[in-house]
Amino acid sequence: TYDEVFTSDTAMALRTLAAETLPECQTCPFGPYCGYCVARGINQHGSPIPNIPLDFECQIYRQMFPYLFRKLLNREEAAILNSWV
């Protein structure tokens, strides 16, 4: 049943996997901004536990966030970015 699936030990364990619980994400300054998707991890790594150095999105985010933060420090560029939201 639905309840059996979502209250199973496996489902409960998967729910505890979040960026806040992964050592690499805990020390990453961008951890609060990206999060970690268990489904994506299973798809990319074959495991819900990510291999962060090989994680494609992590590599992108580690380049993208510093770039965006630099843009936000510039008043003109920040206005453009904010106009898109």
Image (cartoon, rainbow, N blue to C red):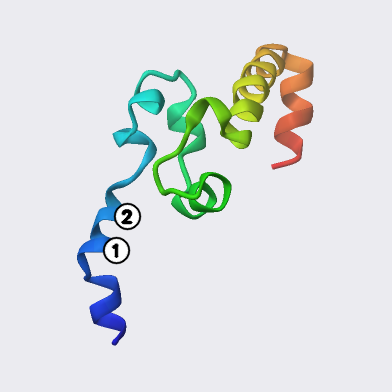
The x, y position of residue 17, in whole percent, is: 33, 46
Image quarter in which the C terminus is found: top right
Residue toward you, 41 or 26: 41
37 vs 62, left or right, is left
Amino acid beneath label 1 = Ala
The x, y position of residue 49, in whole percent, is: 39, 42
44 vs 27, left or right, is right
Establish if 83 lies above or below 59.
below
Establish if 73 lies above or below 39.
above
Amino acid beneath label 2 = Leu
Image quarter in which the N terminus is found: bottom left
Q: Secondary structure at mark 2?
A: helix
Residue at image position (46%, 39%) is 35
Location of residue 27 (image quadrant): top left
70 vs 33, left or right, is right
Q: Secondary structure at mark 1?
A: helix
Residue toward you, 78 or 55: 55
Residue at image position (47%, 33%) is 51
Residue 42 — which label?
none
Location of residue 61 (image quadrant): top right
84 vs 72, left or right, is right
Q: Which residue is mark 1?
A: 11
Residue toward you, 69 or 49: 49
Residue at image position (54%, 50%) is 40
Q: Which residue is mark 2?
A: 14
Establish if 67 lies above or below 11.
above
